[in-house]
Image (spheres, rainbow, N blue to C red):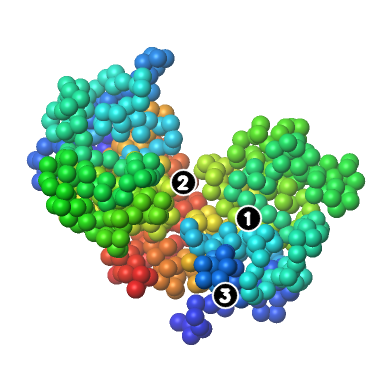
Amino acid sequence: MTTASPEARPAGKEAGAPAPVLAVEGLEVRYGRGRRGRSALRDVSLSVAPGETVGVIGETGSGKSTLARAVLGLVRASAGSIRVGGEEVTGYGNRRWRALRRRGIVQYVFQDPLRSLDPDLTIEDSLIEPLLIQGVERTEAVDRARAFLDRVHLSAELLGRLPGELSGGQRQRVAVARALVTEPALVILDEPVSALDSANRVQVLEILKELRAAGTSLVFISHDLGSIAGTADRIAVLYRGELVEVGAARDVINHPRHVYTRLLVGSAPTLHARTADRSEREALRARLAG
Amino acid sequence: MRTLSRNTAAGSAPQHAPAAPAAPPVIAVRDVRISDRVTDREIVHGVGFELTPGKAVGIVGESGSGKTLTCRAVLGILPPHFEVSGGSVEIDGTDIATLTPRQWTALRGTTVGAVFQDPASYLNPSIRVGAQIAEVIRVKKGVKRREARRQALELLRAVRLRDPELVYGQYTYELSGGMLQRVLIAAAIAVEPRALIADEATTALDVTVQAEILDLLAELRERTGLALVVVSHDLAVVAQLCDEVLVMRQGEVVEQGPTHSVLHDPQHAYTRLLMAEHEQYGLDKFLTPKEAS
């Protein structure tokens, strides 16, 4: 079909498009030093256009959380570059990262909402904190926080509660609202629905779709192809620290190219459409191992 | 033949099970009810199925639906103060209510084995995993140590561990979740049980590893006639492997029947809900059907 090397697909959105919100190039992250060191990411290049949702799919040990942490400045790149909102951030120290985060350009939501929310702050205080840091006046901050609570389908009655008094699903929606109040150019979501039951998962995924429709750029990192498939414009497949395939969501799922992507799609339990049979999977596994 | 609600589906023949239709069931569960002795409340309100050699029965439902209690009742390991308050379980034609502890010990492993969600907690962290399997073989089969070791290695190979010699000498912390679950399956099939109960055995695993384990179970079933009870919250996992499905909710079997007819013509609203959720956020919706190859 295409001759493009290796597994890169024409991105469609990229040609002549405005500057990407996130541009990662040749990123390498190593843990540990010298011979005992191990690279968690190797030569990863990925860009996110304004308003685009990119799903990053990866299983245990793929490096997907390392990617999220690198983009948020929580781990250092050993090589390559990261640009956030046009700003080269690769060499930033803690102070400049803090300043960048304070401006609210890039926000994050983790799997466990208790990691993105201070357990001692009321929901209201959690929501307005990023705005206060930006210098927004308190009354206006509260008004804006209420509006965002509405966007994640939560009632304003929750404002006075503590995170511990909310259900897991409500907490995750508060975490999403908190990530949004500063109207960031980019939100990184690392397994945002994995800890939720199916009803809450459906709700959070719906919210992500609404955000996407409203033009927020999202990087949605997950091990679950199903939840990414309905939410992302493009899918990037991470396997053992390398990006093995990037393409339009529908193409990656229906015409996976890389052996690992084929195995991944072929392994997903489905009700009707049998994606691969046992012998197919067996052959793919042998190719991956060999 | 579809049966709704609490009837047992004794008559429904498996679709493509290799077993002869007349084979007596390895496990027969008849209208089993489970109660909490302390509160005197019935938790499971009548479950029934028959598992003939080579057949696979799936139980699907959310947490608290009673699927795990049902499995534990079959294995005779109900948690404290739970009891079978109605119906019966027969293993190999023997009502388990009549078994002495010694008879139970003889039956477990040799006739019915089980694997659960968290393989690490069923293995001793300070003993090499191979030695743990060999010990099971030595005790249950009464063979010499060297022979037990040989058989354990063979089992590690049979569960498709890539380097059986290496894994034999490793400890649990050195193995991934998928490898541990393989080791546990190896231990469970060590004394060639006729039925294996897999209770959320792949839930904690990555999807590619889950598929490997499910493929392994399917292969064991074909090759050895191992009968399976597969318990999962995921209807698709059960559908992939089983001839018959029981859908449980709040202690009740709301739907039961051959997998293909449950999937193509679900009768109960809850089954339809499970399917709708899957179709909305599983991969199904995004996959264009593949042409047969």
In the image, B226: left or right of A144? Answer: left
What residue is at 54 percent from the left and 63 percent from the top? A63
What residue is at 16 percent from the left and 33 percent from the top? B106
Quadrant placement of the C terminus of chain B: bottom left
Q: Amino acid at mark 2?
A: Ala
Name which quarter of the figure residue B169 lies in: bottom left
Quadrant placement of the N terminus of chain B: top left
- Where does label 2 land, which residue? B276
Q: How far apart in space, not on screen, are marks 1 and 3 (Cα)?
A: 22 Å
For label 3, the crowd category at 10 Å Cα-Cα, with few meaning under 14, some 14 to 19 and many 20 or more, is: some
What residue is at 63 percent from the left and 71 percent from the top? A78
Task: Have a look at marks 2 and 3 and say if they share a chain.
Answer: no
**Mark earlier in primary sequence (1, 3):** 3
Determine contact: label 1, label 3, CB under 8 Å.
no
For label 1, the crowd category at 10 Å Cα-Cα, with few meaning under 14, some 14 to 19 and many 20 or more, is: many
Q: Which mark is residue B166?
A: none
- Where does label 3 land, which residue? A43
Q: Which mark is residue A189?
A: 1
Q: Nearer the viewer, residue B62 or B176?
A: B176
- 2 vs 3, front mark: 3
Where is residue B12 drawn, in percent x and y?
Answer: 20, 39
Q: Amino acid at mark 1?
A: Leu
Q: Nearer the viewer, residue B174 or A71?
A: B174
SS label for mark 1: strand
Label 1: chain letter: A
- 2 vs 1, front mark: 1
